[in-house]
Image (cartoon, helix red, strand yellow):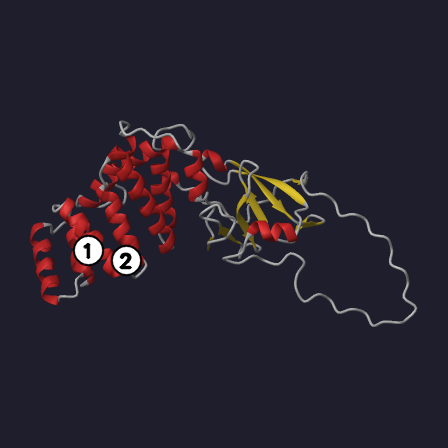
């Protein structure tokens, strides 16, 4: 959803460095007493002073072993209000960053880290706010746990999120499809209003649909976002929106979890039997060639101008 995109070039951290107010300088050491016995020079360390972190590493553990020396302001990290000004905690030699940059929101614990140099820089993020890094990406984003903690106002009577979901769902059903659809533009105009207002009701649901749009290419993150969205939407409105079933099915397809994808396809078609993409995906997920051909003939006859039917017939899939 382009209006809600908050991608930031991972090299865009040319910001004035401030002295770190938290880290205490090391205690000066007395010069060692000269050793009368001649010794060979020690070998240089084989590891960098501030080595890169990896998925599974604990940021608090790393920072306890490598005390942060500097902080820097990071502005415009995200279009969501929580990310408009962050703190980057890092290590410096002169004017150069010599280690990872820890991303900190609201002076709390770090939730991610930037590593590497452009054009090979990348992020690692903590999805659960447990301090441990879960996945890597080149996109700037705010973790789900952070946004859910700041978006806690709920109101089952407020229909704005449902209205936006309805429009997005309908955009997949109409012949023209979602690309350039006025239905999508109308949905964006509703969802954009959630960016700057943490007190807006049901903002958590708006963020989860945004997060899915940004991170669906990482199957584990797409599945996580849709699982949380399904649970929260069901608890709040007493039912599951068909858009969530569509996106959860697609998440399992992207992960190669076809049996789970079939379950969500079945739920989607039972809920909306008229929904063309549900029938299209039933064909895609079927292992029965006779059924696949029957669905193809039926869709071509009933919906020859639908965007997915055109793709199906053009590709011969």
The reply to whether the C-beta atoms of the residues labelled 1 and 2 are less than 8 Å apart is yes
- Please indicate whether residue 36 sits to the left or right of residue 312 in the image: right
Q: How far apart are marks 1 and 2 (CA)?
A: 10 Å
Looking at the image, residue 290 lies above or below residue 172: below
* 224 left or right of 178 in image: right
**Could one spot residue 1 in this view of the protein?**
no
* Residue closest to the far right: 36
Q: Position of residue 212 (x, y in %)?
A: 35, 46
Earlier sequence position, callout 1 versus callout 2: 2
Give the residue pinned by disc 2.
253
- Residue 281, labelled with which disc? 1
What crowding class fits label 2: few (fewer than 14 Cα within 10 Å), some (14-19), or many (20 or more)?
some
Q: Is mark 2 on a helix, strand or loop?
A: helix
Label 1: state its secondary structure.
helix
Residue 290 placement (x, y as % from top left) = 9, 65
Q: Where is residue 301 in the image (x, y as percent from the top left)?
A: 7, 53
Q: Where is residue 95 in the image (x, y as percent from the top left)?
A: 69, 48
* Residue drawn 24% across the image and 56% down it: 261
> What residue is shown at x 29% (from left), y 43% (from top)?
230
Q: Can residue 212 be seen in this view?
A: yes
Eyeballing the image, is 44 above or below 133? below
């Amino acid at each position: 959803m382009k209006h809600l995109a908050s991608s930031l070039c991972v090299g865009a951290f040319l910001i004035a460095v401030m002295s770190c107010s938290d880290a205490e300088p090391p205690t000066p050491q007395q010069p060692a007493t000269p050793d009368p016995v001649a010794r060979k020079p020690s070998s240089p360390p084989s590891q960098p002073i501030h080595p890169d972190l990896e998925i599974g590493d604990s940021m608090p553990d790393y920072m306890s072993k490598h005390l942060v020396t500097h902080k820097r302001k990071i502005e415009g990290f995200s279009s969501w209000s929580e990310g408009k000004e962050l703190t980057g905690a890092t290590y410096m030699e002169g004017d150069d960053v010599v280690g990872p940059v820890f991303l900190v929101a609201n002076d709390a614990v770090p939730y991610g880290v930037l590593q590497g140099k452009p054009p090979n820089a990348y992020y690692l993020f903590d999805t659960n706010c447990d301090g441990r890094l879960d996945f890597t990406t080149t996109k700037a984003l705010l973790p789900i746990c952070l946004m859910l903690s700041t978006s806690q106002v709920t109101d089952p009577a407020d229909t704005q999120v449902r209205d936006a979901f309805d429009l997005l769902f309908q955009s997949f059903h109409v012949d023209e499809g979602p690309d350039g659809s006025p239905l999508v533009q109308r949905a964006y105009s509703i969802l954009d209003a959630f960016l700057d207002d943490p007190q807006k009701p049901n903002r958590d649901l708006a963020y989860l649909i945004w997060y899915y749009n940004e991170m669906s290419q990482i199957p584990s993150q797409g599945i996580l976002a849709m699982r949380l969205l399904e649970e929260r939407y069901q608890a709040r409105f007493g039912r599951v929106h068909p858009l969530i079933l569509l996106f959860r099915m697609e998440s399992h397809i992207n992960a190669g979890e076809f049996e789970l994808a079939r379950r969500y396809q079945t739920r989607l078609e039972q809920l909306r039997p008229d929904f063309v993409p549900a029938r299209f995906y039933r064909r895609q997920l079927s292992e029965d060639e006779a059924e696949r051909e029957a669905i193809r003939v039926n869709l071509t006859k009933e919906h020859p101008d639908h965007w997915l039917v055109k793709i199906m017939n053009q590709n011969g899939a």
